[in-house]
Image (cartoon, rainbow, N blue to C red):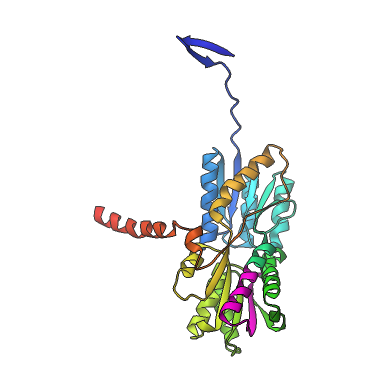
Amino acid sequence: MVEKVGENLYQSCVRPLKHRLYRLGYAAQGTDYQFSQEVSASLQRAAAAEGIELISLNNRYSAKTAQRNADLLVREKVDLAIEFQTDEHVAAVVAAKYREANIPIIAIEVPHPGATYYGANNYEAGLMGGRYLGRWVKGHWQSEVDEIVLLELPRAGSLPRMRLTGLLAGLNLTLPRAKQCRVTYLDGDGNLGPSFEAVRRYLRSSRSHRILVGAINDPSALGALRAFQEGGRAEDCAIMGQNASPEGREELRQPGTRLVGSVAYFPERYGAEIIRVSLDILNQRQVPPAVFVDHKLVTPATVDHYYPNDRLCDLARNVAPVIRAKTA
C-alpha cells in the first residue's frame, strides 16, 4: 500500500482508476440570442473542467436541422445527448432517434419524451413576474389597468406557455381587478422582430393607456417595448420579461424604462449543473425526471445586485478593439 522512498518520505503504491472519457453530444438552440449563447459557453466550460469531450452542433432554431443533428450524434455514438431545440412538434421524433440507439437524453427548456428535463420552473417563474407586475401597477397606476397582452411562443408547446399562465395567476392574486381586463395572446415566436410586428399591429386597434405586457422571454419583451416606443406610447405600457438575458439587463438599466422586470434563469450556470446531471445518469445514480433552476426577480433596482460584473464585461468588450487597433 505504501513504500518508503527516502528519509521520512513515503509514497502510495495505489493508483486511482482512470475514469473513462465520456463523449457527450450537444445540439444547441442557436446563436442569435445571448441566452442560448451563454448556455453553450457554460456547457463548454463545464465539460472542459471535467475532461469530457463535447461534440457541439447548432440546431439553428430549425426543426429539420434538429432532426439531422440527432442523426449525426447517433452516428457519433455519443454516451449522452443534450438537446436544446425549441419545436415541441419534433421533440418526440428527436427523442425516438436517441432511444433507438440507447442514448440517454437531457432536454433543455422544452421537454422531450423519455428525457431528463433541465431548465425553467415555468409556472413559478411566471407567478413571480406576475406578482411583481401587480405590485408595480398598485404603486404607479393606482391599481388601474385597461388591458393585458401576453406574447407567447406556440411552437415551443404547453410547458413554456406556463410562464404566461403563471404570470396571469400572479397578477390576479396581487391585483384582483385585473380579472376584469381583456387578455390578448399574440404570437411573438420568442423573437424580437416578430414580437415587434405583432404588438405594432395590435396597437393600431387599441387606444388604452394602461397596458400590461407579459412576454415568454426578453427578446419578445424588447420587441413589444420597441413597438410602444415607435408609436410614441411607451408610457402606456409596463412589461415583464423572462430570462434576465444580457439584452434585457441592458434595458433594465435605462432610465425610465418600461421593462419593469425580468425573471432570471442564470444560463451562465446551466453548464455545471447539466454536466453534473449527465455524470449522475452515466454512472447509474438516481436522477429526478426534472431539474429546475433557481429563479430570481430582476428589476431596475436589483439588476446590479444580481449581475454586478455586467459593466466590467461591457468595458472589456469596448476596450479590446482599441487595444487591437493600437497594436495593429
Quadrant of residue 328 within the rendered picture: bottom left
Percent x, y of residue 45: 51, 46
Image quadrant where one finds the N terminus: top right
Residue 307 placement (x, y as % from top left): 48, 58
Identify the residue at horizontal 73%, vertical 57% (top origin).
92
In this rendering, position of residue 187 left or right of residue 33: right
Residue 208 in percent (x, y) is at: 60, 88
Based on the displayed image, in which of its 4 quarters is residue 78 positioned? top right
Q: Nearer the viewer, residue 272 or 79?
A: 272
Residue at position x 75%, y 51% in the image: 114
Image: 304 above or below 273:
below
* 242 in the magenta segment: no
Residue 295 appearing in the image: yes
Range of residues picked out in magenta: 129-153
Residue 88 vertical position relative to residue 40 in the rendered view, above or below: below
Q: From the viewer's perspective, is 273 left or right of 247?
A: right
